[in-house]
Each structure stands twice: as C-alpha cells, then as structure tokens.
Image (cartoon, grey):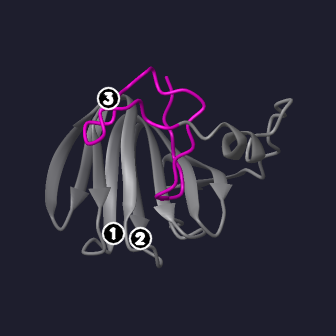
Amino acid sequence: MVLETQQSSYTTYRFYDWDRVDQTTGQKRPLQIKKSMDCTTLPFHDPVLNTEAYEVGDAKVTRFVSTNYFAVYRWLLKNGTATFKRVQSPYALVAVLDDQGSITVGGKEYPLKKGQHFIITTLADQWTIKGDMMIIASEPGSDSLKA
C-alpha cells in the first residue's frame, strides 16, 4: 500500500507517459527527461527521518515528517479513545488505513472504516476518535496536531 503526501505543485516532469495523446494537439504529450533527471537523486538513498512519538489519550502518535510544507502523522488506536485539539493548521487530511472506529466532531459521531478519507476543517477546534484504527493524518505547515 502506498499513500503519497506531497507539497502542492503545478509542475509535472514526465520520464514516460504511456504514449498518451494530448487531446488538443493530437500529439503524444511531451516528456521532460532532463528536468526529471535534474531533480532525481541517483542512486536512491533512504531519507533520514526525524520521527517523534508521543501519546494523545489512548492513541500512539508518530510524527514521520514535519517541514515548512507539510507534516505527516500516524495515529494508532487499539480499542481506545483520543481527543485532539487544533493548534494552528487550517485543515488535516485523514486516511483510515486499517480497522474501524468513529470520530466525534461538534457533538456528532461519524463511523469510520478502512479505506475512508476525509478532511478535518478549521471549523473543528477538537475531535475525538475511538475504536481500533490506524490513521495517517497530514496537514500543511509544521507541527500543529498535538494535543
């Protein structure tokens, strides 16, 4: 399973495009081999992650990445409950990777299950998750999903 989190960008460099045709020109879409190579690291080296682990209620939270562009967290909950409070981020993108549970926001409870994706907007000052779930949450900016 792959869950890609990335900084928003309007730039695309193509090594290969499966011979797709641009509908407006009738020609194969252009490739950007040199530009693609210029921003590729070869040979590949695993990145050094500066992870941080802490607990929020019954949840084991791991921050995998925190940059000026985005932060990525895993919320691991085993038959428990955790209440998160918004610190500064305008939203969080959330993906339920395994199992099931629920989220309570604004006094209303919503069921969650593996495969669901949703956004926690700035309207939610806090939310509570409960159940057995592995969740990946990402947000713009730096560390702001701490309890």
Task: Provide the residue span drawn in magenta.
Answer: 1-30
Point out which mark residue 103 bears. Answer: none
Nearer the camera: disc 1 or disc 3: 3
The alpha-carbon separation of the residues under discs 1 and 3 comes to: 22 Å
Q: Quadrant of residue 122?
A: bottom left
Rendered location of residue 35, percent (x, y):
68, 46
Nearer the camera: disc 3 or disc 2: 3
The amino acid sitting under disc 2 is: Lys
Q: Which residue is labeled 2 in the image?
A: 85
Name, please, the residue furthest toward the left.
Answer: 108
- Does the magenta stretch mainly form a helix, a strand or a loop? loop
Q: Which residue is labeled 3 in the image?
A: 114
Q: Earlier in the sequence, mark 3 or mark 2?
A: 2
Rendered location of residue 101, percent (x, y):
28, 37
Q: Earlier in the sequence, mark 1 or mark 3?
A: 3
C-beta proximity under 8 Å, tags 1 and 3: no
Q: Disc 1 on helix, strand or loop?
A: strand
Q: Which residue is labeled 1 in the image?
A: 126
Q: Is residue 24 magenta?
A: yes
